Every structure is written in C-alpha cells, then in structure tokens.
C-alpha cells in the first residue's frame, strides 16, 4: 500500500490483534471511510464471543435510538453465562450527549467490550472525549482512499483471496463504484465467488457478466474516446447512453467528464513550463492511476491548457442546462451528443447542426 495510507494500515494492525485474541475493552471507530469500522466490528464479535454466547451477550444499538446514559447502563451490565459482553453502538454521531461517554471511558467495565462507531464522521479532536479515548481505548480514524490509490487497493484485496485482476477490469470497477469501499468489496466478493477454482484472474468479461457493467458502454470508455478525439466511438457511446438514459443518467456522465478533464487541468498545471515530475508525484498531483496517467499525457497534446479550461466550462454549462429549462426540448441523449461534439470539435454547435 502507498505510504500515506498509514491510518488504514492501522486498521490492519487492529484486525491482526483481534484475530490473536488481543481485544481492547473499548474501541472508537470513526472517519470518512466506514468499511474498516464494519469489518472491525465483525471481527470483534467473531473473536470475543462464541456463537452460543452471542444471543445474550451481544448488544447492537444505534445512535439515533439511544443516549450516552443508556449506553453506559448497557456497558455496566454483567455478561450472562460468558466471561464478557460486547456492546456495539453504530452511527454514534447521532448521539446528542456523546460527550458524556467520557466518564465511562475513564473507568470502563472490565467484562464489557464497548465499540463506539461513527459513520462518515469524526469526534472533535480538540475535545476531551477524543483525548480520553486516545489514552484509554483503541482508536481508528479512517480516511477515504484517493482515486489514484484505489487500483492498488483492489489488486491487494483480490490477492488476499488468492486471485489476480486485470488492470482494465479493476478500472471498470473503480469507475463504477468510485472510492466507496463497501460498494467495491461487495462487487469484488461477487466476482471472486463466481470464479471457478481453475480461474486465477478476474477479467473484464467476468466484470461485465457479474456486475452489469458494459465493457463497451461505460463512462470510462466515453472519456477515453473523447480524450483520443475519436468522434465516431464517442458519439456511438453517447447515443447508447441517450437510448438508455435511466441506466446512464447524464448527471453521472457529466460528472465523469468533468472529473477527468479536471485531472487533465491539474496535469497541465504541474507540468507547466516544462516542469518534470516523477511518476509518483504526477499520480498524486493528478489523482489518477498509472494506466490512466498515460492517457492524460496523450490527451494533454490534444487538449492544451486553454482548450482544457474551455471544455470544463462547456461541461458545466451543459450540466446546468440539463437541470433547467435552458435545454429547451432537447432529450438527454441529444444534450449529451451535442456536448461530446463540442468537446471534440472545438467550434460551437447547436442541436440543429447535429441532425
């Protein structure tokens, strides 16, 4: 994993400790990426309680339905016919009086494993509750992966299951799922399950057959065609998107185009004046992955800095038009096809000239 994923590596450290039976009396799980909190909670339950003990000694409550006082009451109960109980509080960011948990954190009950899990949020690190948790509990503050880190994460996850994945297949998944690891893992687990014992590599065909993502018609292929200024292919994909607009909504397609041209703009910015950066620096600066960086480098010659800025402006304009009456009677497909035409062919056009 990349060096700046140290916080996520800490999640791996926590999981390894739990698997060895080294279970803390308290966990504070928070941050932008909820995936790690989910799997840590699963491992705590798996390792702290036997299946027969879980009926009476596993308590799961939600922040919107409880208070700090009630949580402390649960945590100070004695386990039933077991050496300990596990109390998991999910979506703890919804607890109004969460600061009151500091009193319990200072003096935890020895036979309780208390897990406080915030979804997509973190405690105020200036507050005394967080500082007390750092002293007394196991704390994870999980950050979201950057786009340029996602491919290596996917490859690593698949490798842990004894398989490999083609780069293009990983790209298809990353484009479809984004950096939401819950969604990525769900799709990867599905793919791994469907592979036969003799199959060692997840291919683009596997992705297409098991996830509903088309190898030919997806936002990644549209961007690739636009970057290459392959008008025929780009218009073919745009027409397909227009025909099946519910499956390929313009809002997502526009967002994909905007995202990639924004990366191209960052590439121009960091290479302006002939500045030379290493591959790692370029990946981080542009927020992309290795194979896509080569496409950015190629696209930079086809869309110089000034033109790249014009394209971003055009995408914004069409996104605004799609959400307002400014589109007139144009369908989603017609709007997208005109946008693609205007990006690839520098001169302005109108829907009338497309027909």
Image: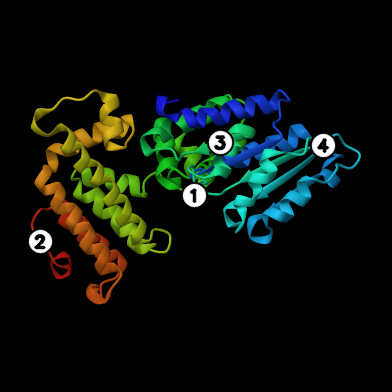
- Residue on which disc 4 sits: 84
Q: Sequence order check: which comes first, mark 4 or mark 3? A: 4
**Which is more foreground, mark 2 or mark 1?**
2
- Residue on which disc 2 sits: 348
- Residue on which disc 3 sits: 140
Q: CA distance from mark 4 to mark 1?
A: 45 Å
How crowded is the residue under tag 1: few (<14 C-alpha within 10 Å), some, or many (20+)? few
64 or 295, which lies in front? 64
Please state the horizontal and vertical placement of residue 278, each as a whole percent of the image.
24, 23
* Residue at the image point whose x is 85% and y is 40% from the top: 53
| Secondary structure found at label 1 | loop
Q: Sequence order check: which comes first, mark 1 or mark 3? A: 3
Q: Which disc number belongs to residue 212?
A: 1
Q: CA distance from mark 4 to mark 2?
A: 70 Å
Marks 1 and 3 in Cβ contact (< 8 Å): no
* Residue at the image point whose x is 57% and y is 53% from the top: 93
């Amino acid at each position: 994993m990349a060096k700046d994923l140290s916080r996520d590596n800490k999640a791996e450290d926590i999981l390894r400790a739990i698997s060895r039976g080294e279970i803390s009396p308290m966990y504070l799980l928070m941050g932008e990426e909820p995936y790690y909190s989910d799997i840590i909670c699963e491992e705590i339950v798996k390792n702290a309680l036997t299946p027969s003990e879980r009926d009476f000694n596993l308590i799961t409550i939600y922040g919107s339905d409880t208070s700090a006082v009630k949580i402390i009451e649960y945590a100070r109960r004695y386990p039933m016919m077991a050496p300990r109980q596990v109390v998991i509080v999910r979506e703890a960011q919804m607890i109004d009086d969460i600061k009151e948990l500091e009193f319990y954190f200072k003096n935890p009950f020895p036979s309780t494993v208390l897990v406080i899990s915030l979804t997509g949020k973190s405690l105020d690190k200036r507050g005394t509750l967080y500082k007390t948790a750092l002293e007394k509990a196991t704390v994870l503050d999980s950050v979201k992966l950057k786009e340029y880190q996602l491919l290596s994460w996917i490859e690593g996850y698949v490798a842990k299951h004894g398989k490999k994945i083609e780069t293009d297949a990983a790209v298809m998944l990353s484009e479809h799922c984004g950096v939401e690891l819950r969604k990525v893992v769900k799709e990867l687990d599905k793919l791994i399950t469907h592979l036969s014992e003799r199959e060692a590599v997840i291919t683009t065909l596997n992705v297409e057959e098991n996830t509903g993502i088309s190898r030919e018609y997806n936002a990644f292929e549209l961007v690739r065609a636009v970057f290459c200024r392959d008008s025929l292919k780009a218009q073919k994909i745009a027409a397909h998107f227009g025909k099946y607009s519910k499956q390929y909504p313009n809002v997502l397609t526009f967002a994909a185009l905007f995202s990639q041209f924004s990366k191209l703009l960052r590439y121009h910015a960091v290479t302006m004046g002939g500045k030379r950066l290493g591959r790692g620096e370029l990946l981080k600066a542009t927020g992309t992955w290795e194979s896509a960086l080569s496409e950015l480098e190629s696209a930079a010659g086809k869309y110089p800095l000034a033109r790249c800025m014009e394209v971003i402006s055009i995408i914004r304009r069409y996104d605004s038009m799609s959400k307002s009456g400014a589109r007139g009677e144009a369908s989603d497909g017609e709007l997208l096809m005109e946008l693609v035409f205007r990006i690839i062919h520098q001169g302005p056009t109108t829907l009338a000239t497309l027909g």
